[in-house]
Amino acid sequence: MKHRTIYLGMILLSIFSSNGQTMQNEERVLKGPYLGQKPPGMTPELFAPGVVSSGMNESSLVYTPDLREIYFDVTHITHQYTAIVCMKRQGGIWQRHEVAPFSGEFMDSSSFIDGDNQKLFFCSNRPYKKNHDKQDFDLWYVERNNKGWSEPINLGSHINSDKIDVNPCVTKNGTLYFASNRDEGMGGHDIFKSFFIDGLYQTPENLGAPINTSDFESSPYISPDESYIIFNVFVRSNSDRNSGLHISYKTDEGLWSKLIYMGDTINMGGPSMFAHVSPDGKYLFFTSQNVPYLPYAGEALNYAELKAMLTGPQNGSGDIYWVDAKIIDELRSRE
């Protein structure tokens, strides 16, 4: 009964605190770069319950380099609709959630903001041109201007294929990494990169082994200096590997090391995905559909308890978690 009461109290608090938030004029004023949240240790914690992790299907959270804006995906449970949502910190206080000005009409997801805070990359199934019927997922970007963000710009046919191209990530020197199931792959989805030379993206290259396999690799996060890569692997049923987030480190010879499964601490209750390290290097964010336990097993529920369990965070939809980024250095010892 004690665990039931604690769990219900936490979920109800997250629901009530998320309703109608202005972030500024109501009881709960959120300040600081991480929405006033207590920093996690080496065990992942739910990020901003009731604010970011609300019970909806949230994923793929990223910060701007100045830590004043966050962008994350909100997806319909059937995955037939995804929008990019943003929150901004003004005068030290986080403001109300908004759908990003370039999103909301099509299926948009997987934001990534470059180190200069001038471009936001994302993927979308929007048509390449007006009245164009091509609507597979392509890579797009928007640029900062005096009104906020420009109209979306397609990266072009030399980057995008006639297959699925998703999950963009850009390094400090401009190299673009992304996932695709294009014909040059090794199995399902693979991870590709495109060098940025003289202001132009070059023909994408498959990263090859050991990063790509006959399984499904996706959602890459590359450290700004390209010293490590974290990505999701969906393993086929006949594989002896685990699905979930894996990491590989760049060797002294400039090659990728063997893949390291990031463990059940990160891939808790099932495979996690959409890793992203905060711009200050302190925290690793990722997405999980973890349901820690069923607190009401064998007990009758009243309506408030039922609503709390079904609509609060950790109900089986996607939630955002964070953990101390020191875990990245700890995993290096397993090479």
Image: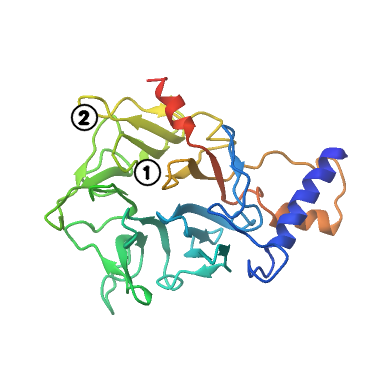
Q: Residue at x 66, y 50 (%)?
A: 315
318 w.r.t. 140: above or below: above
Q: Residue at x 24, y 38 (%)?
A: 207
Indicate left or right for 156 with 34 as reference: left
| SS for dot 1 | strand
Q: Residue at x 34, y 41 (%)?
A: 223
Q: Amino acid at mark 1?
A: Tyr
The residue lying toward the viewer, choosing from 249 and 316, is: 249
Q: Quadrant of the image for the C terminus? A: top left
Query: Residue 173 placed where, x, y %?
Result: 23, 47
Q: Residue furthest bottom?
A: 131
73 w.r.t. 6: above or below: below
Say which quarter of the image contains residue 163. Answer: bottom left
Q: Residue furthest top?
A: 334
133 w.r.t. 315: above or below: below
- Residue that numbered label 1 is attached to: 221
Marks 1 and 2 sit apart, C-alpha to C-alpha, by 18 Å
Q: Residue furthest front?
A: 91
Say which quarter of the image contains residue 41. Answer: top right
Q: Quadrant of the image for the N terminus? A: top right
Say which quarter of the image contains residue 228. Answer: top left
Indicate left or right for 258 with 287 as reference: left
Q: Residue at x 57, y 63 (%)?
A: 94
